[in-house]
C-alpha cells in the first residue's frame, strides 16, 4: 500500500510538472531580444599627415602638411609657403578618408618596376608611418587619401 501511495504521488507530481511547463509556454510572453552588438567606431585620425609630391611633366615639387587635430595646413611650393586653416567639413572628410584607408596596414613602398616615364612620385607620412609610391603604382587603398590631399593643395593654391 505504501508503494501504491508513492506511485500515485509520483504520478501527481509528474502531471503537475507537465502542466506547469505547458502553462509556462502559453503565457504569451516572448523572451527579450538580444541587443544588437554596438559597432566599434572608427578611430578619428590624430596627429599630422604630410604629402610630398614631385616630378611629372610639370616638374612638381609640393609639400602639404595638415595637422589633423586643429586643421592647420601648410603648403610649400618651390620656395613659397602658404598657411591656411581647413574648414571643418574638409577636415572631417580628410580624417574619415584616412581612417578608411588604414594607412598602417599598407606597405612602405609601391614603386613601378621600370622608371620609363615622368611619374609623379608621392611620399605620405602619417604619424610613424611612411609610404612611397607613384601615380603609376598607386594602390587603390591609398588613392582616396592622395585625391583628398591633392584637392586641398588645389584649394590652397587657388586662394593665393
Image (cartoon, helix red, strand yellow):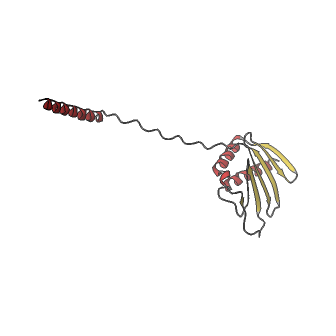
Query: Farthest residue toward the right?
Result: 79
Indicate the position of residue 14 as horizontal and vertical percent values. 22, 34
Judging depth in this view, the residue of 53 and 89 nearest the camera is 53
The quarter of the picture where residue 22 lies is: top left
Task: From the viewer's perspective, tell me whether residue 41 is left or right of residue 27.
Answer: right
Judging depth in this view, the residue of 147 and 128 nearest the camera is 128
Indicate the position of residue 116 as horizontal and vertical percent values. 77, 70
Task: From the viewer's perspective, tell me whether residue 2 is left or right of residue 120.
Answer: left
Q: How many marks?
A: 0
Residue 81 position (above or below residue 114)? above
Residue 19 position (above or below residue 98)? above
Residue at image position (67%, 51%) is 104
Residue 100 position (above or below residue 32)? below
Q: Quadrant of the N terminus?
A: top left
Residue at image position (71%, 54%) is 146
Query: Farthest residue toward the front?
Result: 2
Indicate the position of residue 43 as horizontal and vertical percent values. 64, 43
Indicate the position of residue 139 as horizontal and vertical percent values. 67, 59
The quarter of the picture where residue 84 lies is: top right
Residue at image position (65%, 52%) is 101
Residue at image position (20%, 34%) is 15
Judging depth in this view, the residue of 22 and 122 nearest the camera is 22
Task: From the viewer's perspective, tell me whether residue 67 is left or right of residue 16.
Answer: right
Query: Farthest residue toward the left?
Result: 1
Amino acid at each position: 500500500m505504501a508503494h501504491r501511495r508513492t506511485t500515485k504521488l509520483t504520478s501527481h507530481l509528474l502531471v503537475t510538472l507537465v502542466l506547469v511547463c505547458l502553462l509556462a509556454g502559453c503565457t504569451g510572453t516572448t523572451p527579450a531580444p538580444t541587443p544588437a552588438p554596438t559597432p566599434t567606431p572608427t578611430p578619428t585620425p590624430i596627429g599630422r599627415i604630410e604629402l610630398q609630391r614631385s616630378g611629372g611633366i610639370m616638374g612638381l615639387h609640393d609639400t602639404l602638411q595638415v595637422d589633423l587635430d586643429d586643421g592647420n595646413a601648410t603648403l610649400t611650393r618651390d620656395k613659397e609657403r602658404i598657411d591656411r586653416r581647413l574648414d571643418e567639413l574638409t577636415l572631417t572628410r580628410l580624417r574619415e578618408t584616412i581612417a578608411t584607408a588604414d594607412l598602417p596596414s599598407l606597405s612602405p613602398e609601391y614603386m613601378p618596376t621600370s622608371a620609363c616615364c615622368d611619374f609623379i612620385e608621392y611620399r605620405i607620412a602619417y604619424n610613424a608611418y611612411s609610404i612611397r609610391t607613384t601615380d603609376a603604382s598607386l594602390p587603390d587603398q591609398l588613392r582616396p587619401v592622395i585625391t583628398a590631399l591633392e584637392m586641398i593643395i588645389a584649394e590652397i593654391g587657388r586662394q593665393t
